[in-house]
Each structure stands twice: as C-alpha cells, then as structure tokens.
Image (tube, rainbow, N blue to C red):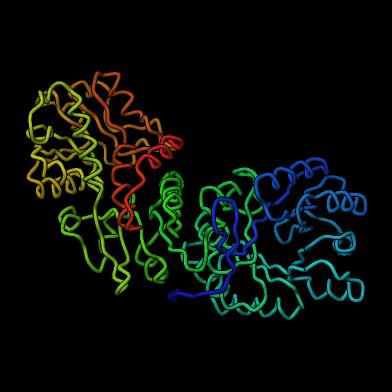
Amino acid sequence: MTFGGFSMGTSELEVGHGVRRNSTLVCVPIMAESVDEMLDQMRKANELGADLVEIRIDFLNNFSPRQDLEILIKQSPLPALITYRPVWEGGQYKGDEIKRREALLMALEVGADYIDIELKVAHEFFNFIQGKKPEKGLIIVSSHNYENTPSVEEIGDLVAKIQATTADIVKIATTAQDITDSARIFQVLVHCELPFIGLVMKEKGLISRILSAKFGGYLTFGSLEAGVVSAPGQPTIKDLLDLYNFRQIGPDTKVHGVIGNPIGHSKSPHLYNAAFKSVGFNGIYIPLLVDSVENFLNTYSSPDFVGYSYTIPHKENGLKCCDEVDPVAKAIGAISCMIRRPTDGNLIGYNVDYLGAIAAIEDGLRELKSTNGLSGSPLAGKLFVVIGAGGAGKALAYGGKEKGARVVIANRTYDKAKKLASKVGGEAITLAELENFHPEDDMILANATSVGMKPMIDDTLIPKKALKHYSLVFDAIYTPKLTRLLREAQESGAAVVYGTEMFINQAFVQFEKFTGFPAPKQLMWDVLARNT
C-alpha cells in the first residue's frame, strides 16, 4: 500500500509568532490522584498553550462523581474532555459499568465539552442516555488497539462501526510495529466524513501525532511532562508547540526528517525546525525511527515528503534506494542526505558528512602549532586512523584521502576494514590492534562508530594509554558532546574536535539543499549550544 498525496482545506489563523495553518486541537491529558492536583495540572496546561484538557477521572482516588465533576469541569480554564477509561480498554477503572455510564452522563449534564466512550459499549451507552443528553457536549466514540495497526480496510470498517453509533467524533488509536503503520491512519483520516482523531502509539508512531495537523486530525495529545503519558509515544505539549511548530503545520507543509535507528537522541529536529521557522519556510523536520529504508520510502511517496538526513545504520541502505547518486556519495558508498526532486519525484542522494567532519578536523589542526602556517590541508601527509567502516567511516576515509592523509581503517570486522582501506589506498587493522598501534607520534584519530553515544556513555574502543600517540582526536558522536573518548584524549594531551562541529557544518549544507535558502548559521549554532 502506497500513501500518496492528499489535500484538505483549512483556514489560516494568526497565532503566536506566525500563521496558524491548521485547526487541529492540542489536548493535554490530566492524570492525578486528587482533584486539587488535577486543577493544578489544568492551569499548567493552559499556561503552556493547550486548547483543551482530557480529564482522566479513572486516575482519581475516592472519586465522588457529582462533587468532583462540578469542581473539575466548572473550574477548568480550558474546554474539558471527560474520560473514565476501564481497565479492559487500557485505563484504571475497575468498577461497575452502570456507575461509569452514570458518571459520564453526569459529566455532560454538568457542562463537559466532550466525553469519551469506548466502541465496545457505545450502543449500550447511547441507549442509556436516550432523551437525557443535554444539547451541549460532544461524544467521542473510541477504539484502542494496543497490539498493532490493522489494514486500511479494517480501520475503515472500524470508522463505519463508530459512525453507526451516532458518535459526534471518531477516535481510533492503534500501535506501531513499523513507522509505515501511520500511513494507514493518514489514508483513512483524510477520507473520514466525521471529525476524526487518528493516532498511532509508541515511538514508531510519533509521526502520526505530529502530522495529524497536516492531514486534518481533530486533535492530538501532548503530555505536560516527558514520560508522564496517557499512551506510549506521546510527545510533550512543549515539544509539539515549540520544537515541531505544530500550529504552523498545514496541508501543504513539506515533510523532512532524520532516518535512523535508534533516533531518539537526535538533535536535528531542534536545529532544522528552528531554522525553517526563522526563514519562513513551510516545512517540518521529524525523527524517523526506520527499520527498512525501502519500505519507508515506498510508503511515504507523496510529493510532500521531500528531504531526509541519514544517520546510523542507514547511510549505506539509503544509497541503494536512490534514483540518482552524487559522484562523491557514490565514491564514498554512503549517503547522508536525500532530496526528492520536485520535477520528477526522483530521490537524489548526497554525502555531506565528509565536508563537515574534515573541515572540523582541519580547523582543529590549524590551531595546533605543528601546522607551522603551511598552505594546503593540514591533514596532508598525516597518519589518519579511522575507527569504523560504516557510512560515517567511509565518509571520513574518503575525506582523509582527498586531503592527502595516509589512512588507516580499524574495524571490528577486519574484512570490512580491508575493503574500505583498499578503496582509499590505506591500511586495515582490527580493533584489537588499536591498543598497540603507534608506528609514529602525532597521529590523528577519528571515531566514526556509535560507541560512546547515549545511553552507553561509558563505552570506548581504544584504551586511554594508547591516546598519547595522537595529536588530535575527533569523535563523530555529539550526544554527549564530551564523550569518554574525547575526555580521555584531553587528559592524554591531545587536542579534541567535537562531533557538534561536524554536525553543524553538514547541517548548513543540508539546510540549503532542503530549502534553497542560505543557512541561518548563528541561529543554528545557538540552538545546538542550547541542546547539547
């Protein structure tokens, strides 16, 4: 199933620091054990810019329906959605079904703007409230699947069943086993006649929560705090509004992202979304937790899915999926950037990693007295040891060779090291040999693996005692900024170059490829400094 382009109408409203391009509401779940705590959370949600709150009364201790609902609904600073979720649908309520129905009807009578009732019991609920429902108050009929995301046909059938209950709003939440699962929800979302809340849970479903604004979702959920969520994979309201510029996402917004696995550590969304906003570019940049690059690209083939950064472990897989490859990327054997050409939809692969990394290493070397102000690259003639033979390792090895360095590849798999070394006219060694490898002093070391990246920040591939033979050490990792490798290199007397330098240099180039605008370099540096 391929997800192509869909369009929808939406009014543009002035909001915050720009045009609001969608009418999708941002709802904050309120989950606390006491009424006072809930009221406090509602005030915070209002301050953070929420449109409404979902009051999860199944979380309350000693719930007293009439008294508590009066306070919660009438004192809420925002429109209120009342949810009384039973355990059999993923909630906390274990009591009598009749009492639950009575409480939800009472919520409508007290003045709730919305209530949520599960599809499994919706017909019984509508029979129960027949003739008693006040005019105010919309009823959301919901279905939650905590195992997977069904086919488009099955989701369509669910929508039809919910519509048949006389629901005002359809809500379907499924679970992502793959990032492509969200496309099925998007496809149903754009064709649904009733207002539709369509969300895919877990980290691989994050795209559904952010792009609900692009495809016309009625609302999306954002938590007050990271980790305190009503469903897995929920972003915070702060991230929705400030990081992803949720209000500015519209039907014609261009989608970009960083493709990797893992991807939660990436600071790229901070950088590009702030930069897009600063130049008035109508784009969004999101983390894409991808298992299969080919499946992802085949599924999200719409002309609006236009540009991607590639990170570990997909730089080589990305190259295989390109329609055309830049000669440098072809020589390296990996891409770091992919653009969909608007004229024909072809995917073009580039590698800008080597530019970012080599420029950062050269700058570091120029600051050392050993360069003596010589013209040409300070890497020329140096022994340049690259750890790793994957996409980043290939880029560094290629860059080193282009600058006249003598390249040595160290890799866990010797055959991969040998293959790469032969391409760049270099030498290959195993990781085990690194400890005693010092044919000369003042060597240059570059780590192009993920070893030492969050959360495994205590890991390193080279013993500290071996670092004394290097005059400069570079680590492609930028989370954390000061890795164990760099810290131990500093302690051994070597100059260090942070992964942030490579990251920002290649980000400038990618931004210009994504947007056609010059990169707002100072802004991007400032954003990176705040987030690393």
Q: Residue at the spot x=7%, y=32% of the render?
A: 375
One can see residue 262 in this view: no
One can see residue 221 in this view: yes
Compared across the picture, whether 226 is left or right of 481 comes to right
Compared across the picture, whether 223 is left or right of 256 comes to right
Residue 374 in picture, x, y percent from top left: 7, 28
Residue 407 in picture, x, y percent from top left: 12, 39
Residue 480 in picture, x, y percent from top left: 40, 34
Which residue is at the front of the view, 382 or 275? Answer: 275
Which residue is at the front of the view, 121 or 112? Answer: 112
* Residue 334 sits above or below residue 371 on the image: below
Which residue is at the front of the view, 86 or 333? Answer: 333
Viewport quadrant of the N terminus: bottom left
* Residue 314 sits above or below residue 217 on the image: above
Viewport quadrant of the C terminus: top left
Image-quadrant location for residue 111: bottom right
Q: Residue at the spot x=18%, y=44% of the render?
A: 414
Compared across the picture, whether 311 is left or right of 69 comes to left
Q: Residue at the spot x=51%, y=52% of the render?
A: 244
